[in-house]
Image (cartoon, rainbow, N blue to C red):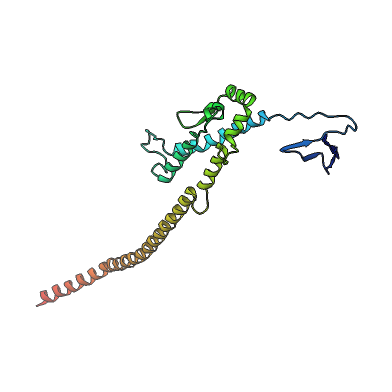
């Protein structure tokens, strides 16, 4: 497939498939059919529907994560308990980290400086919700500001860039908060299991000792009737001998 580019040199680009990249920066051409000699006008516009879908996916994923965390701190009055991890400091730090991400802001950017200014609102329970009308207006009329907020070209300091970096730090296999907590939990679990194994071994030994002692007591008790009969017989003989005299 040949693609003609309307530049001064009038060059041609060859592609083995109908999907062509590299002709226009950041643009992929999906060629549907051939029209030799016919001029084709390309209009490149922001993919607002794709951006809106991406926002919805992000909000859904964030809400799933923060809801899962929040549930651990929810008190159940019926049982008088909270979640199993309600006293875990690492989980509390993770909750604070996630909530802190939603307060991220930039300066300038034509007033589009926070998630709320774009149409992504923070609810009282820590979850996010999308103001579809406001987000649609932002994407339609202020796409550049939207893109700058999420992917700032200055020092890679956009919201998405910062969130990605923070999540990488949280999940770092060596120093990440989550992996450090998991490693500590596994160590605690191994220690507890070792204690349980040792206790069970002592129980087995103690059981054997008690079984032996109880067997000896049982044997002694079973011998009592015969011993009593012998004593009675001996007493009877003594009584007879005494009467004979």
Q: In which quarter of the image is the N terminus?
A: top right
Q: In this view, does 25 lie above or below 173?
A: above
**In the displayed structure image, the side of residue 111 where residue 200 appears, left or right:** left
Q: Quadrant of residue 159?
A: top right
Residue 210 in the image: state x and y as whole percent: 32, 64
Q: Quadrant of the C terminus?
A: bottom left
Furthest residue toward front: 8
Q: Quadrant of residue 244?
A: bottom left
Residue 85 in the image: state x and y as whole percent: 42, 43
Decide which of 147, 32 is in the foreground and name it.
147
Residue 33 in the image: state x and y as whole percent: 85, 33
Q: Is residue 86 above or below residue 199?
A: above
Decide which of 234, 136 is in the foreground and name it.
136
| Callout count | 0
Q: In this view, does 177 lie above or below 131?
A: below
Residue at image point 40% right, 41% down:
86
Decide which of 159, 145 is in the foreground and name it.
145
Residue at image point 16% right, 72% down:
235
Residue at image point 56% right, 37% down:
158
**In the displayed structure image, the side of residue 16 where residue 99 appears, left or right:** left
Furthest residue toward left: 245
Decide which of 88, 230 is in the foreground and name it.
88
Residue 197 in the image: state x and y as whole percent: 41, 60
Residue at image point 52% right, 53% down:
173
Furthest residue toward bottom: 245
Q: In which quarter of the image is residue 139?
A: top right
């Amino acid at each position: 497939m040949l693609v003609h580019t309307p530049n001064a040199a009038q060059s041609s680009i060859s592609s083995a498939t109908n999907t062509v990249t590299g002709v226009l920066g950041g643009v992929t051409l999906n060629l549907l059919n051939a029209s030799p000699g016919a001029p084709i006008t390309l209009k490149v516009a922001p993919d607002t529907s794709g951006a809106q879908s991406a926002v919805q996916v992000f909000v859904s994923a964030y809400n799933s994560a923060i809801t899962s965390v929040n549930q651990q701190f929810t008190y159940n009055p019926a049982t008088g308990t909270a979640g199993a991890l309600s006293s875990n400091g690492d989980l509390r730090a993770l909750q604070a980290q996630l909530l802190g991400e939603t307060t991220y802001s930039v300066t300038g950017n034509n007033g589009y400086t926070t998630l709320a200014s774009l149409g992504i609102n923070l609810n009282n329970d820590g979850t996010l919700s999308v103001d579809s009308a406001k987000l649609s207006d932002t994407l339609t009329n202020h796409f550049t500001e939207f893109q700058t907020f999420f992917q700032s070209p200055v020092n890679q300091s956009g919201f998405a860039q910062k969130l990605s970096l923070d999540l990488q730090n949280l999940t770092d296999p060596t120093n990440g908060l989550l992996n450090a907590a998991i490693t500590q939990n596994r160590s605690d679990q191994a220690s507890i299991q070792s204690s349980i194994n040792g206790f069970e071994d002592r129980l087995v030994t103690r059981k054997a000792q008690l079984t032996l002692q109880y067997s000896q007591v049982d044997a002694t008790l079973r011998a009592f009737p015969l011993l009593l009969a012998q004593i009675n017989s001996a007493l009877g003989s003594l009584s007879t001998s005494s009467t004979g005299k």
